[in-house]
Image (spheres, rainbow, N blue to C red):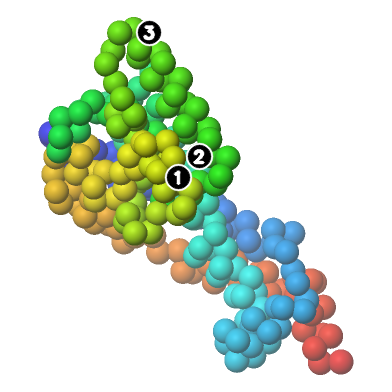
Amino acid sequence: MDQKDAILQKAQNWFRETIAVNHEKNTTKLKNPSEHQINPFLLPYLANFFEGEATPISIAKALVYPRALGTSITTSFGTNIQSFASSVLSSYGSLIPGIDIEFTDCVDGLKMYCQLKSGPNTINKDDVETIAHHFKDAINLAKTNKIKVSFENFAVGVIYGETKDLSSHYQRITKQYHHPVLIGESFWYRLTGDANFYFDLIECIAQVAIEADFKNKLDDVILTLSKSQEIEDIVKKLHQ
């Protein structure tokens, strides 16, 4: 197994064992009404908007679906990016504080010191300053050790997305601090030298979806939540 195949296999295992497992665990919790911010003004509207009626089941769906299919797994993916670096890209690991991986750019041959982020909208204003500070410290350390580097050797690598989708915070990293931001297809091409690697990675992780048949358990979560006192009270008030 070559290095690229090893990355694909590790990525698939990481997604299955970290993201999918946590997703199921976090979704199961949603049967408990205390896991939700129950807004009695909005919920009947959302239930009617979604299913054409405000029943206990439709209200439970209006609460569970956004969390189970959006917020929960998106947050999990973003917060586990360091786990991704250590598990999937361990062969590129860096010992420099603030740097996740080091690699030789397969496009232009530059030695790259890279901090990883998950997607094109996953940093805020304060993160920009933190990243720039880490890179500045690393550049100073390199100079102390007489290693020739410049701003372009220190980059942010974004696991998925396209350049046009990068938030203004990512754009500041390039415009104000002159560090490259490598995203999606470009990042993986520069890391592996394989122009199709990004799409192979997407396909590889997508195979986990075949195993992810959670429908019956999700239905049970919705049914249990629909029987909670909190939702019953909302429905009763609608019919008073």
Residue 96 lies, with reference to residue 160, above or below; the image says: above
Give the residue type that dot 1 points to: Arg
Question: Is the Cβ of the residue at disc 1 closer than 8 Å to that at disc 2?
Answer: yes
Whole-angstrom CA distance, mark 3 to mark 1, is: 27 Å
Q: Residue at x 29, y 28 (%)?
A: 153
* Mark 3 or mark 2: whose residue is earlier in sequence: 2
- Which of labels 1 and 2 is toward the front? 1
* Mark 1 or mark 2: whose residue is earlier in sequence: 2
Location of mark 2 (residue): 128
Q: Which mark is residue 72?
A: none
In the picture, the quarter occupied by the C terminus is bottom right
Q: Is residue 52 left or right of residue 20?
A: right
Q: Secondary structure at mark 1?
A: helix
Q: Residues within 10 Å of mark 3 (few under 14, many from 20)?
A: few
Q: What is the x, y in percent for residue 238?
A: 80, 88
Q: Secondary structure at mark 2?
A: helix
Give the residue type that dot 3 points to: Thr
